[in-house]
Image (cartoon, grey):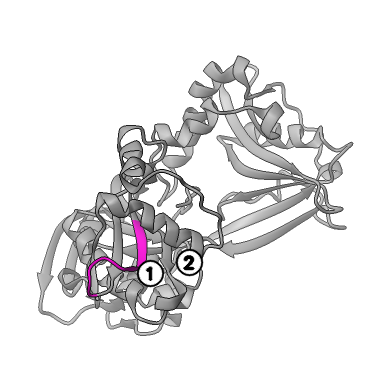
């Protein structure tokens, strides 16, 4: 088996593998080189711009592709810093080559490659959490999916108004929507720094044809405070406004979106959207009984630290202290160390590798989930292969719950 990054003429073949693995039709008449040149000359997404950032497993002939996945670069927010992240997507193996270890071999090559490229984190959306734990990934945080019955939304004392994203309002939306998103970006670990690609939906918006509606709420003074994108789902008796985007800056912005949703009550029954754990709705929605509000909690992706040293340098700590952290990482040898971290006023002031007994020893998977802030200190004793030798009070200054959210899929 040969593992390597793909060549330009192999981009199309990876997409053919994706179509088989994900049961999706793929009908592209371009030659492999025509497809590659189109992506390079006029990319319409991050994936197209970085189309050669894909690893593949080949038979020994170095031509027969068996498995592949995308290694897509992003910038993300982490503890007040901008960090490099790689999103893993399109993990695919042709059925006749499954159980041959192609994906494992790709990870064995891709993870050290990420380290060499200066990447701090990797993220993916798993088909199986148990499978990706083998490669050091761990569940990062939970996403709260709310379903709110429209008649139970109160009449809020708001004075602002909403506008629909369409051709006539596109100029305003180009300014308002990035402004709102970036307010979220500053608050949450793992949020992806936006690029032009993230706003292509503004330029292509055609709600009358596509029946995809984006509304922006502005205060009476004209400040953009919230936006949501939704489709009207009539496939069941629930008749729901299904939101794919739901962002707000403050309470008024949230109330503005809910007020708009309530205006659909004559034809629809519910609005459904997702929020991070730190944005509870109990004080905004007074009625929760009789099916007025339901909430489904789901894990949302898995994180992996690629460069432990860099992440410890950038991490935000609580107060002052010193801790020795031992990491076990079977894929990236540079992470297999005992890292001594000294911090003051919440920031790392010194980081060295030592030979002393650690205060805590963790596999890379547990370290990844804890340092990003998906779990509180109380969760540490539940983790397998985690041993605490030092003071738990000091450990709690390093591993504690933070605001975590990611809305970008890949």
Q: Which residue is pictured at 82% across the width and 35% down the height?
A: 264
Give how far apart the Cα atoms at labels 1 and 2 are.
10 Å
Segment colored magenta:
60-70
Location of the N terminus by quadrant is bottom left
Horizontal side, residue 247 vs residue 118: left or right: right
Q: Position of residue 248 (x, y in %)?
A: 58, 36
Left or right placement of residue 243 versus residue 348 in this view: right
* Viewer-nearest residue: 323 or 227: 227
Q: Is residue 204 magenta?
A: no
- Crowd around label 2: few <14 · some 14–19 · many ≥20 (10 Å): some
**Residue 138: x and y, percent?**
41, 70
Q: Which residue is mark 1?
A: 137
Precedes in sequence: disc 1 or disc 2: 2
Q: Secondary structure at mark 1?
A: loop
Is 231 situated above or below 73?
above
Q: Nearer the viewer, residue 76 or 154?
A: 76
Count of marks overlaid on the render? 2
Report helix, strand or loop for mark 2.
Answer: loop
Q: Is residue 219 in view?
A: yes
Q: Position of residue 56 (x, y in %)?
A: 30, 64
Residue 126: assigned label: 2
Q: Nearer the viewer, residue 401 or 366?
A: 366
206 sits left or right of 309 in the view: right
Q: Position of residue 323 (x, y in %)?
A: 22, 69
Q: Nearer the viewer, residue 168 or 366?
A: 168
Front disc: 1 or 2: 2
**Does the rendering let one see residue 222?**
no
Q: Are marks 1 and 2 in contact (CB under 8 Å)?
A: yes
């Amino acid at each position: 088996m040969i593992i390597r990054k793909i060549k330009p003429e192999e981009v199309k073949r990876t997409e053919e593998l994706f179509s088989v693995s994900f049961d999706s039709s793929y009908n592209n008449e371009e030659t492999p080189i025509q497809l590659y040149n189109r992506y390079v000359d006029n990319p319409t997404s991050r994936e197209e711009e970085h189309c050669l950032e894909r690893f593949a497993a080949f038979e020994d002939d170095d031509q027969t592709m068996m498995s592949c996945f995308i290694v897509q670069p992003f910038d993300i927010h982490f503890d007040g810093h901008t960090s490099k992240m790689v999103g893993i997507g399109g993990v695919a193996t042709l059925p006749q080559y499954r159980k041959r270890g192609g994906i494992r071999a790709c990870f064995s090559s891709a993870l050290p490659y990420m380290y060499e490229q200066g990447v701090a984190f990797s993220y993916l959306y798993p088909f199986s959490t148990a499978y990706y734990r083998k490669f050091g990934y761990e569940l990062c945080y939970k996403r709260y999916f709310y379903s709110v019955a429209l008649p139970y939304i109160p009449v809020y004392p708001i004075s602002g108004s909403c506008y629909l994203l369409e051709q006539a309002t596109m100029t305003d939306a180009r300014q308002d929507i990035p402004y709102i998103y970036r307010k979220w970006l500053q608050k949450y670990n793992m949020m992806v720094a936006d690029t032009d690609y993230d706003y292509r939906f503004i330029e292509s918006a055609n709600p009358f044809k596509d029946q995809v509606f984006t509304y922006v709420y502005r205060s009476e003074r004209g400040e953009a405070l919230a936006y949501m994108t939704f489709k009207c789902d009539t496939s069941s008796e629930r008749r729901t406004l299904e939101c794919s985007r739901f962002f707000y800056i403050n309470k008024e912005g949230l109330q503005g979106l809910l007020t708009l949703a309530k205006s659909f009550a004559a034809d629809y029954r519910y609005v459904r959207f997702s929020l991070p754990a730190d944005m509870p709705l109990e004080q905004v929605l007074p009625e929760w009984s009789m099916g007025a509000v339901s909430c489904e909690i789901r894990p949302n992706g898995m994180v992996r630290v690629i460069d432990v040293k860099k992440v410890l340098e950038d991490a935000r700590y609580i107060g002052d202290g010193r801790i020795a952290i031992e990491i076990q990482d079977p894929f990236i040898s540079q992470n297999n160390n005992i890292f001594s971290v000294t911090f003051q006023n919440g920031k790392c002031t010194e980081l060295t590798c030592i030979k002393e007994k650690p205060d805590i020893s963790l596999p890379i998977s547990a370290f990844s989930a804890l340092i990003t802030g998906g779990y509180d200190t109380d969760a540490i004793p539940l983790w397998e292969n985690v041993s605490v030798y030092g003071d738990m009070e000091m450990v709690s200054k390093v591993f504690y719950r933070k605001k975590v959210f990611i809305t970008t899929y890949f």
